Amino acid sequence: MAQFGTCCTDLKDVMAGEDFEPLVTAAENGVLYMSVGLIEGEKDGDEGGMVDHPVFFCPFCGTKLQTEEEVRAKGGFEDDDATA
Ligand SMILES: [Zn+2]
């Protein structure tokens, strides 16, 4: 997981996120995601959840962090129709 946050201190600080829940997080599969929105629960008791999207470039300094191919290889696209 140490491959993200090395490009600049801004991303490093965000990912450290001790005082808040970061919206940019590295998943267990090694893909870096950014939360882009909220899904509201459709019925009572349904809490909904965050919508995550893979991040390809650092939002702070523009460094390329990962490629679409890398994300795909790690299974980072949940909605992808690939069988792997
Ligand atoms: Zn950066």
Image: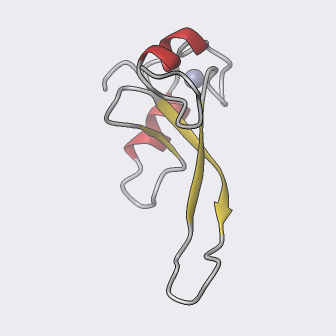
Q: Residue sitting at 44 percent across and 14 percent down?
A: 73
| Residue 26, percent from left and from top | 41, 35
Please identify the quarter of the rendering in which residue 38 is found: bottom right
Taking the spot 45% from the left edge, 60% from the top edge, the residue there is 20
Residue at x-position 36% and y-position 55%? 18
Q: Is residue 78 above or below residue 8?
A: below
In the image, 76 versus 18, the foreground residue is 76
| Image-based side of 22 in relation to 68, left or right | left
- Where residue 15 sits, quadrant-wise, is top left
- Which residue occupies 66% across, 29% down? 60
Quadrant where the N terminus sits is top left
40 or 34: nearer the eye? 40
In terms of image quarters, where does ligand 1 lie? top right
The colour mode here is secondary structure
Q: Nearer the viewer, residue 12 or 83?
A: 83
Q: For residue 58, which quarter of the picture?
A: top right
